[in-house]
Image (cartoon, rainbow, N blue to C red):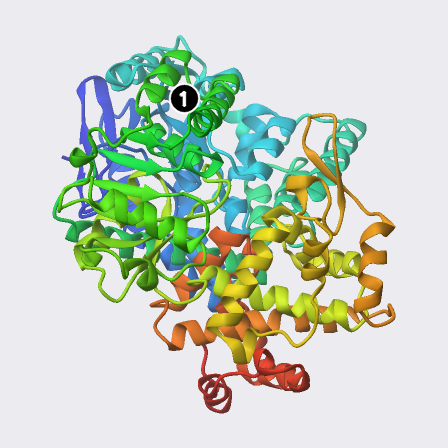
Amino acid sequence: MLFSGKALTVQMLENGIAELNFDLKDESVNKFNRLTVSEFSEALDAIEAAEGLKGVLLTSSKGVFIVGADITEFGDAFSAGRDGVAELMNKNNVNINRLEDLPVPTAVAINGYALGGGFEVCLGCDYRVMGEAAKVGLPEVKLGLIPGWGGTVRLPRVVGVDVAAEWIAAGKEQRADSALANHAVDAVVPNEQLKEATLTLLQRAIDGELDYKARREIKKTPIPLNDTEALMAFFTTKAFVGAQAGKHYPSPVAAVTSMEQGYKVNRDEALKIEQQQFIDCAQTDTAKSLVGLFLNDQKIGKVAKSWEKKADKKIERAAVLGAGIMGGGIAYQSAYKGTPIKMKDIDQKGIDLGLKEANKLLAKLVERGRMTPEKMGETLNRIEPTLSYDGFDQIDVVVEAVVENKKVKSAVLTEVEGKVSDDTIIASNTSTISIDSLAETLKRPQNFLGMHFFNPVHKMPLVEVIRGEKTSDNAVARVVAYANKMGKKPVVVRDCPGFLVNRVLFPYFAGFSMLLRDGADFQEVDKVMERWGWPMGPAYLMDVVGIDTGVHAEQVMAEGFPDRMGKTFKAATDVMYEAGRFGQKNGKGFYNYEEDKKGKPKKVATEEAYELLKPHVAERREFDKDEIVERMMVPMATELARCLEEGIVESPAEADMALIYGIGFPPFRGGIFAWLDKVGMDEFVKMADKYAELGELYKPTEQMRKMAAEGKTYY
């Protein structure tokens, strides 16, 4: 053994080949934390000093190669300013250069994932062989960053500027077939043949059959583009990437800029350019927010895993009651992720609708090459449509997804409780109705809770797991485990009107209603909030949710919190509802809807909505953009603070992630609590106090005022 550490080892194989093996102890994956980077340097010392060295093979003993840098180390480094970021990045840049400059050929066997810094190490090698199930990629833009260990320098020299720009700016993982077609790797083989195939390729380079020095030279010298070619390549790419990313996400353009400024110079000069671009990105609010989100996502994942461990048994058989679009979506998601599910309805039409929904979603996967027709058949076979309760005594969890009406839900829940075993967990997919009130008629309330999916089920990551007063820990644990198995992001919350997400969303809509009452133009409010970062403005969002659904939810919230959410005026949503304008579902809401060329609803502004609103709102006037944002966001922020203080949600991280995963709160802002920390609680309290006359929703909590006085933050 030439070197043995806690993260990697180096041993000599036959024919003078040194195997550099990554295997980070006490971790499920390999990553470039400070320990790995330091040992990588020591391992290179040992390799450079080895006698009779003829080649170097890089391998991993984990199920993946290397997933990238250790993001948990970014916070301290980034807060230390430009020098702190440079210090974090420099050592591994030196390491990869040393690997690339060894006097012998190098080859890497890529198994599982090689992402970020993991793929950058692969690019530092002369030859790359990939397992057929492996994936590679440079996803740094998802953290508001760019590759910082040579990705923008080596990848365009290996695959060309256009492909490199596309891969880096999109941040997507690339499958083996794509990597091979774009010459990012030299071969793709079955995983069991990976090491042997890589050694064979390396031996050919050692024997002089392959000219490793020539291909190495390509990575170390300028890219051979003349000025016109470069102008065309970079100008059009930057324009396209900038338009796709938007002004709130500067890193994709910074990545292309790094390539553009570095293409004319050698590797070492280009790496200096890349580092400056990386540091610039690392200092942005966007990067800080997105890194914070990544860490919050890890936190909520750990919380969910700790719940899962408390479950007394695995969820192996599920059922959904109500087979419409929502029921079909739940059945699809369960079956797609491997849990067989019964889909029950009282009507064959409902069954047909649910199956049609599941079929449509699976067909799209086949169309996109993400699933074979055989796998589609297997998945559909895991959905058992039924009009009866036969076999329900064998079910581990039942999700009720019938119409959002308390009487109907209570009747269905009481009925199903009599058909399942004493051990079965029953969950309601209600979006607003109190779990405690639904539990009143049940004999086993300890086995009952909420499991609130967001629409469309297959796209929205969040599942609110709502525990009632009598819900047992075991019921929560089993439902969290089921949500995890379905590939969802479960967040456990306590019962209250609207639970967490809707309780916080409807004060936002209340702010919107008051703006319209006072003369704001709903189109202008939409534009301002979309520019602020929301995927759609409040009028458009209400149309998509369904104005009838929204009005019902507003009534629930008003009954639950009359002092804050009771209305003293006729809201714009009430006007639309009474006019039979329910939004996208019937083609008319705040906007009218027409089908575009792809058959999707496209919003069209007309005078119809304005005419209906005219008798109920003040004369239209222009509002300052900052006032619109403040009047929309203050009620949302104060209500979320109440939820945290009341223990509806356990932590700022869970609250922020719930809003990002549930309603698309702008990720680059990091969540509401992260946004409050950036604004500063003192400034926020002053902002809110400007609108005190608008009512209780605009009043910060006493805890918020105390935090402002003491200079405290949520994170």
Within the image, what quadrant is residue 696 found in?
Answer: bottom right
Q: Is residue 9 left or right of residue 331?
A: left
Q: What residue is shown at x 36% (from left), y 15% (from top)?
A: 377
The correct choice, above or below, for 653 with respect to 326 in the image is below
Counting labels gives 1
In this rendering, does residue 530 appear at all?
Answer: no
| Residue 521 location (% of width, % of height) | 81, 62
| Residue 311 location (% of width, % of height) | 16, 49
Residue farthest to the top, as pictured: 209
Q: Is residue 284 left or right of residue 43?
A: right
Q: Pick the quarter of the image with the C terminus.
A: bottom left
164, 579: nearer the viewer: 579
375, 611: nearer the viewer: 611
568, 317: nearer the viewer: 568
Q: Secondary structure at mark 1?
A: strand
| Residue 539 location (% of width, % of height) | 70, 55
| Residue 418 location (% of width, % of height) | 20, 44
Q: What residue is shown at x 19% (from left), y 58% (from top)?
A: 446
Q: Is residue 278 left or right of residue 440?
A: right
Residue beneath label 1, please?
127
Within the image, what quadrant is residue 30 found in?
Answer: top left
Q: What residue is shown at x 34% (from left), y 32% (from top)?
A: 344
In this rendering, does residue 426 appear at all?
Answer: yes
The correct choice, above or below, for 129 with respect to 262 in the image is above
Residue type pointed to by label 1: Tyr
Q: Pick the quarter of the image with the N terminus.
A: top left
Q: Specify few, some or many for label 1: CA neighbours under 10 Å numbering under 14, 14-19, or 20 or more.
A: many
Q: What residue is shown at x 24% (from left), y 28% (from top)?
A: 18
The correct choice, above or below, for 375 with respect to 422 in the image is above
